[in-house]
Image (cartoon, helix red, strand yellow):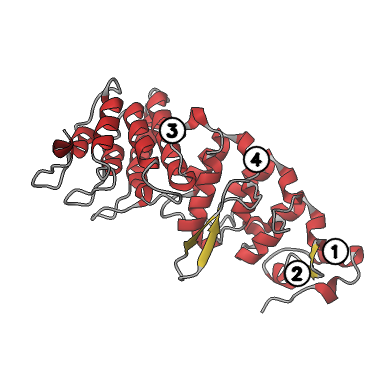
Amino acid sequence: GLDAAASSDGGGRLPLHSLVSSSPSSSDGWGSAVEVLARAHRGALTAGTGRGDTPLHLACERNVPAGVLRAVAKMTAKEESPPHRLPLLPNEDGETPLHHLLNHHRAASRFYHLAGGADLPSEMETYDKIERIMCLAHHGLDHGPSEFGAARALHAALWLRRRFGARVVDDEVVERAVRSHPLQARQRDDGPSYLVKDDAGGQLVLGGGGNFPLHVEAGTPPDALSSPGDGDREGVLDILLRFYPAAASIANDNGELPLNLMVRSGRSWRGGIRACVKAHPPALLWVVNSVLAPRALARIVVGGDFGLGTVFEAVRGKPDLVEKCEVAR
């Protein structure tokens, strides 16, 4: 009955906690059982055990079958409005549901490579679960890889890394999302946006804005990346440009090109600006409200091996460039 679903043991575990942590070996019937217990006690999905684990924590920690995780995610999606806090809520040990899945995926990836590719299904299934949780955290939907519509794994991964940095979603996860869903590099984010507080206490707008994945990546500051991208290795931005170079020439709803966002976020010349300029050189001359949008051409020059030749070409193409350029201080 309802009373039984709401009763906890000495460790603060509700029946739903116990069900999920019993590590079912298959999804048969377990998904339905999760939904029944979640409906019987509406607070069960947000309730924590003595160590602060919600049912979603336990499902991810035990790496339950996809069907069971799908049921937990489906019911969790109905509990909150985006941005969802449960997928990124730390327990007393500082572990989030997403952290648990990332740990499982790293272990599966290591075994996959050691076994010469013998355990590919396990590695792929674990990554699919990561995408489901990222979509739940950002989009507020329980869509999985085969159900993508409004819930795009690539947008979710990029926005979450921009919000939390590599400590939550590292470059490897984002790169995997790009390579797994190359067509999503061509999709504009016309979904809803929402405000969150950043680490400095200010407000950060996430989602929507007519941003392509390249815009989101361009606006991500270097300190949010696993690697600043100053080396020769192909990074997330390079992959996005390879899959959809035209995004470098498209403005978002605020009239900003990726190059403008990149300069404003503090990215360096070798950390992405060079690749963006190469993809769309006219971005150097993009003017918004009588101001040169890639603010402070001088800043880019100082940032590395920009080359005086490129600067001369920009000035020759727009003689009043110097008058309209805002110098960074």
Mark 1: give few (<14), some (14-19) or many (20+) Cα within 10 Å.
some
Q: CA distance from mark 2 to mark 3?
A: 42 Å
Q: Which residue is mark 1?
A: 314
| Mark 3 vs mark 4: in front | 4
Answer with mark 2 or mark 1, whichever residue precedes in sequence: 2
Q: Does residue 235 show up?
A: no
| Quadrant for the C terminus in the image | bottom right
Q: Which residue is mark 3?
A: 128
Q: Is residue 149 above or below residue 292?
A: above
Q: Which residue is mark 2?
A: 297
Pointer 3 and pointer 4: residues touching (CB < 8 Å)?
no
Circle number at residue 323: none
Q: Helix, strand, or loop for circle 3? A: helix
Q: CA distance from mark 1 to mark 3?
A: 45 Å
Q: Is residue 254 above or below residue 41?
A: below
Q: Position of residue 266 (x, y in %)?
A: 61, 66
- Three-letter amino acid code at disc 2? Leu
Pointer 2 and pointer 1: residues touching (CB < 8 Å)?
yes
| Mark 4 vs mark 1: in front | 4
Q: CA distance from mark 3 to mark 4?
A: 20 Å
Question: Would you say 265 lies left or right of 136 here?
Answer: right
Q: Which residue is mark 4?
A: 187
Residue at (57% x, 58% y) in the render: 220
Answer with mark 2 or mark 4, whichever residue precedes in sequence: 4
Q: Position of residue 106 (x, y in %)?
A: 37, 39
- Three-letter amino acid code at disc 1? Ala
Answer with mark 1 or mark 3, whichever residue precedes in sequence: 3
Q: Is residue 42 above or below residue 200?
A: above
